[in-house]
């Protein structure tokens, strides 16, 4: 199995709030939700994404939903004493997790991150762009995650994307998901981001493709077997 990763900040003036994890049996993409001016937290979204990523790695042996719930609890403890975790805009992330264990691929998506699994028979595209749910300070939020599992022998390749990268397909329609996987197989996931940035640059006023952020933090983790 080979894993490749690409990530690029949406702007040169601010650090990316996307994070990517490539562990021995775990892949994840975290996308920090853009902070409101007042969110009850003195640390910031980037800090929260870092802590949650670290906590997920610590419990990577658990199934994804269990691992994420545990990680959310642990991350909350790190700033429960200093910050108002009941604040509605408390830092949170959209997240995609893929765990490969015991000949099974398990995935989890919470929020507008995307997991694409090519199973030879079908292409499974998992994302929740409607509900705006995220992983923040409450472990109960993880109950709303989309989860599933596929026998590893049926998996040909898998990609995890933050919404800033998935927009190459679901906003700009540069290619369909199967073509996107072919592109990543041939040129690596950074080529997807490069091609998308070129389009974003051409439409710098968001006229052809109306969007809030001209370019967003974009992250892809791609695995093929
Ligand atoms: Zn905090």
Image (cartoon, rainbow, N blue to C red):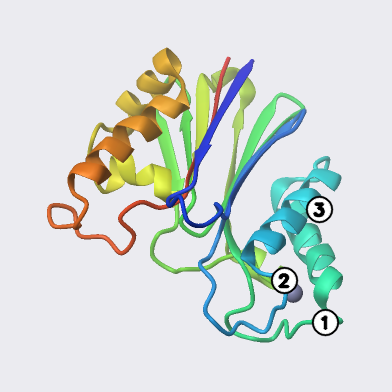
**Is 2 above or below relative to 110?**
above
- Indicate the position of residue 27 as horizontal and vertical percent values: 66, 36
* Circle number at residue 43: 2
Instruction: Please give the residue where the numbered disc 3 appears in the rendered image.
Output: 55
Spatial separation of the CA atoms under disc 1 and disc 3:
19 Å
Asked where in the image residue 139 lies, by quadrant, the reply is bottom right
Instruction: Please give the residue where the numbered disc 1 appears in the rendered image.
Output: 82
SS label for mark 2: loop
Taking the image as drawn, is residue 203 in sight? yes
Spatial separation of the CA atoms under disc 1 and disc 2:
9 Å
SS label for mark 1: loop
Residue that appears at 42% across and 22% down: 184
**Is 107 above or below relative to 37?**
above
- Indicate the position of residue 204 as horizontal and vertical percent values: 22, 52
Please identify the residue farthest to the left as the structure is shown.
208
Task: For label 2, count other residues whose C-alpha is less than 10 Å away and answer few (under 14), some (14-19) or many (20+).
Answer: few
**Is 135 above or below relative to 18?**
below
Asked where in the image residue 71 lies, by quadrant, the reply is bottom right
- Indicate the position of residue 56 as horizontal and vertical percent values: 77, 49
Q: Would you say the beta carbon of the disc 2 residue lies within 8 angstroms of ligand 1?
A: yes
Task: For label 1, count other residues whose C-alpha is less than 10 Å away and answer few (under 14), some (14-19) or many (20+).
Answer: few
- Of residue 167 and residue 146, the one placed in the foreground of this image is 167
Spatial separation of the CA atoms under disc 3 and disc 2:
16 Å
Left/right placement of residue 47 relative to residue 200 reads right
Mark 1 / mark 2, whichever is N-terminal: 2
């Amino acid at each position: 199995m080979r894993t490749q990763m690409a990530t690029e900040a949406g702007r040169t003036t601010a650090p990316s709030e996307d994070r990517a994890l490539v562990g021995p049996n775990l892949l994840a993409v975290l996308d920090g939700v853009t902070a409101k001016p007042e969110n009850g937290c003195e640390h910031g979204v980037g800090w929260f994404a870092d802590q949650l990523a670290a906590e997920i790695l610590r419990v990577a042996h658990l199934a994804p939903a269990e691992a994420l719930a545990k990680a959310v609890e642990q991350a909350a403890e790190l700033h429960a004493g200093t910050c108002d975790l009941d604040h509605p805009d408390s830092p949170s992330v959209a997240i995609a997790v893929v765990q490969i264990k015991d000949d099974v691929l398990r995935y989890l998506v919470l929020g507008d991150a995307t997991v694409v699994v090519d199973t030879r028979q079908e292409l499974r595209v998992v994302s929740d762009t409607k509900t705006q749910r995220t992983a923040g300070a409450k472990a109960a939020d993880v109950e709303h995650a989309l989860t599933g599992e596929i026998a590893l022998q049926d998996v040909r390749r898998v990609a995890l994307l933050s919404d800033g990268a998935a927009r190459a397909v679901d906003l700009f329609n540069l290619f369909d998901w199967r073509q996107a996987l072919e592109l990543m197989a041939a040129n690596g996931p950074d080529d997807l981001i490069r091609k998308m940035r070129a389009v974003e640059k051409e439409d710098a006023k968001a006229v052809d493709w109306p969007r809030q952020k001209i370019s967003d933090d974009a992250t892809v983790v791609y695995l093929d077997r």
